Amino acid sequence: QHCFSRSIELDGTFPDAWANLGLLYAERGAQVACDLALDGLTQVADTPLMWICRGLILETKSSVMSQSHDSDFLKAADAYRAALQVSNHPSALLGLALTCRRLGIDSETSYVGPGEKYTEAAKAMAMTESMVNMDLYQSQTGGSNVGSTVVKGLLAIEESIKRAGLAGVELFQDGKQNLLRAKKTFAMLRSEKPDDEMISCDLALKSTYPDDCMPFS
């Protein structure tokens, strides 16, 4: 924080210093300080990091203030979309994929329309947008993020449940392959670090699936 602040003192037009300071505050949940840093960034550059920071701060706010949960996630998704209009930044793709998944699964009140069918259609669109952006993120990053590979696998399996016939089976198999790939990568990482520094991927997945539906079995 001191280094970024000092950099801004020396050159207030250096966008990377403003952006990194904003990200630092966003990660700490310091909303007021983050907003001030982002306002400073807005004055010197049009960068996707400004909108990514705003998305992060809105996600943090939604976890603290449950009353505005859906509203904040909708605003966070819009912030990531705004970032993508500036640049196809991988962090914006990942942020939009994850917020859309949350909206598609958890949302109960955020969509206003003529009845339940509209709400269900909006949730389905959110899940589709999540899958598309996760695919783009994976394509950009080469699938190096284990967590995103797990989420991609879960998205495919969740979608397979809604589809009948061969399409559903193929989606399930695709999801299973992604989970297996994540497990293999995780095992490689775990072999390079002490066990007490790693969280078991198996335990996380077993908490999601019944024993007889584990994709690794």
Image (cartoon, rainbow, N blue to C red):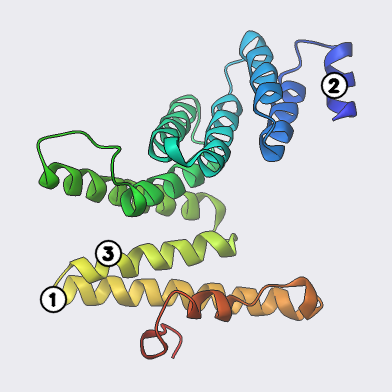
Residue positioned 64% across, 77% down in the render: 200
Q: Residues within 10 Å of mark 3 (few under 14, many from 20)?
A: some
Specify whether 190 is left or right of 10: left
Residue positioned 64% across, 20% down in the render: 35
Q: Mark 1 or mark 2, which has the lower sequence index?
A: 2
Residue 152, image x, y percentages: 43, 62
Residue positioned 50% across, 76% down in the render: 205
How many angstroms separate mark 1 from mark 2 (CA)?
58 Å
Q: Residues within 10 Å of mark 2 (few under 14, many from 20)?
A: some
* Closer to the eye: label 3 or 1: 3
Q: In what quadrant of the picture does the C terminus appear?
A: bottom left
Q: Mark 3 or mark 1, which has the lower sequence index?
A: 3
Q: From this viewpoint, which residue is outermost toward the front?
A: 67
Q: Mark 2: which secondary structure?
A: helix
CB atoms of marks 1 and 2 within 8 Å: no
Residue situated in front as seen by the camera: 210 or 98: 210
Q: Mark 1: which secondary structure?
A: helix
In the depicted structure, whether residue 43 falls above or below residue 5:
above
* Closer to the eye: label 1 or 2: 2
Residue situated in front as seen by the camera: 31 or 4: 31
Residue 55, image x, y percentages: 53, 33
CB atoms of marks 3 and 2 within 8 Å: no
Mark 3 highlights which residue?
159
CB atoms of marks 3 and 1 within 8 Å: no
Q: Amino acid at mark 2?
A: Ser
The disc label shown at residue 5, or none: 2
In the depicted structure, whether residue 97 falls above or below residue 40:
below
Q: Amino acid at mark 1?
A: Gly
In the depicted structure, whether residue 190 falls above or below residue 87:
below
Mark 1 highlights which residue?
165
